Amino acid sequence: MKNILRLLLGTIILFALESGAAAQLSQSGGGGSTVSILQGGNTAAVDASGRLSIGLNAVGGTSITLGQKAMSASLPVVLASDQSAFTINSAQSGTWTVQPGNTANTTAWLVKTVPVSTCGTTAFDSGLVENIATGAGTDLATAATCVDAISMSNTTGSPVTITIKDKNGTPKTFLNAFSLPANSNLILSLERMKFVGGLTLISGTAASINAQLVGFQ
């Protein structure tokens, strides 16, 4: 321990002499006690374990105080290449530019609207169904559907009645025996009216009505 202290003190004295300022050394107690190094009014202590305690209160002539500082008054921090992951709390401010993915802002944004209804958000289209049946009719949808519109076309030269029901346990009639004129078309807007279980269209005359339904399920 004494040899370590001698080597440490010799190094400090040599550094002080080379910088043109002589240091005063003082030691209290015997071996293994604290050694004080006094230079230019500043005191550094070496404890019994050989550790040198130095108070750092300035960087580049700028006093160090607590709190957030500018770069000129901050200590640089270097992270080791094998540093394990850690969390940094940060605050974001200023002006931010938002663009669609990695595409420049000159590209138009793609906006997808989600319908508000009592059904799902999946668009449904029955496609054109020809020759709607009489009697039990023809199903245009077999699951609960919020109907936007139904297009119906009378392909004959005579009026034909049409009836619309849902597919509830006990079907409810929404349109009963409505007369569609000869060779005419009707687009019935239902504003996403919900048909429980689906929708059935019934024609009053065979092979005379073609229909198509669009909505959400």
Image (cartoon, rainbow, N blue to C red):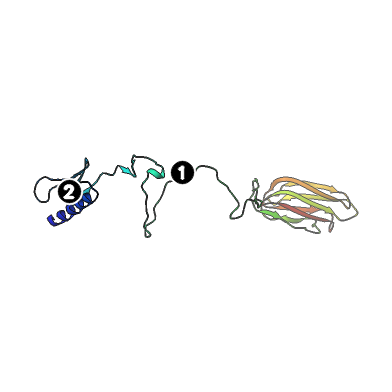
Q: Which residue is mark 2?
A: 47
- Mark 2, Cα crowd under 10 Å, few <14 / some 14-19 / many 20+, is some
- Comparing 23 with 68, the one in front is 23
Where is residue 152 shown, x and y percent of the image?
A: 81, 52
How many marks the image carries: the answer is 2
Three-letter amino acid code at the position of disc 2: Asp
Which one is earlier in the sequence, the residue at label 2 or at label 1? Answer: 2
Disc 2 vs disc 1: Cβ atoms closer than 8 Å?
Answer: no
Left or right of 156 on screen, residue 92: left
Q: Which residue is mark 1?
A: 91
- Mark 1, Cα crowd under 10 Å, few <14 / some 14-19 / many 20+, is few
Tell me which residue sits at (88%, 55%) in the image: 156
Helix, strand or loop at label 1? It is: loop
Tell me which residue sits at (20%, 53%) in the image: 14
- Comparing 22 with 104, the one in front is 22
Three-letter amino acid code at the position of disc 1: Ala
Left or right of 51 on screen, residue 73: right
**Of circles 2 and 1, which is in front?**
2
Residue 44 sits above or below residue 103 on the image: above
Q: Which residue is situated farthest in the left direction here?
A: 30
Where is residue 161 shown, x and y percent of the image?
A: 83, 50
